[in-house]
Amino acid sequence: MSIRRLLWLSWLVLPVQAADLAPELWDRPRSAQAVMGQVAVQRAVATYQASSAARIVIIHGPRQESQLQAEELRAWLVALALDSARLQIRADPLATALRLEVTE
């Protein structure tokens, strides 16, 4: 495979946008308004809606609590009418906060 092709393919998986969620979201009961009030969620959803090829990747840390938060956030996004096929969850052992990445 040529270097040009590898660079092109790497472009497809590089994040278009990435942002950490505020940890305060998890300090109180969640609602659709609280989830959509997060700047990181607003930006990710706006980018997602701008491109039919965009995907949101929810990245969580190694702890079970962060995995559960990622799964809850994904459920909220699906409830708010985002296509579940375009939402992914990925573990990152170095992650210290829940992170949203939008890729194309």
Image (cartoon, rainbow, N blue to C red):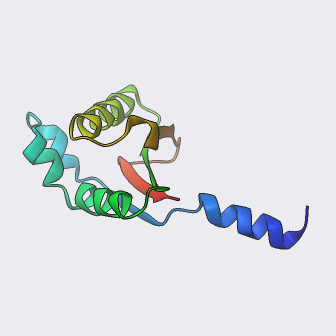
What's the residue at 36%, 64% (across, down)? 50
* Image location (x, y in percent) of residue 70: 35, 36
Residue 88 in view: no
Residue 67 in view: yes
* Image location (x, y in percent) of residue 91: 51, 38
Question: Residue 38 falls in which quadrant of the image?
Answer: bottom left
Number of labels in the image equals 0
Q: Relative to 79, say whether 43 is above or below.
A: below
What's the residue at 75%, 69% (across, down)? 7
Q: Relative to 51, say whether 91 is above or below.
A: above
What's the residue at 13%, 54% (across, down)? 37
> 78 left or right of 12?
left
- Return the residue found at the far front: 52
Question: Residue 47 falls in which quadrant of the image?
Answer: bottom left
Q: Nearer the viewer, residue 34 or 87?
A: 87
> 9 left or right of 103?
right
Q: Nearer the viewer, residue 95 or 70?
A: 70
What's the residue at 33%, 29% (across, down)? 65
- Return the residue found at the far bottom: 4
Question: Residue 69 falls in which quadrant of the image?
Answer: top left
* Image location (x, y in percent) of residue 33: 8, 46
Q: Quadrant of the N terminus?
A: bottom right
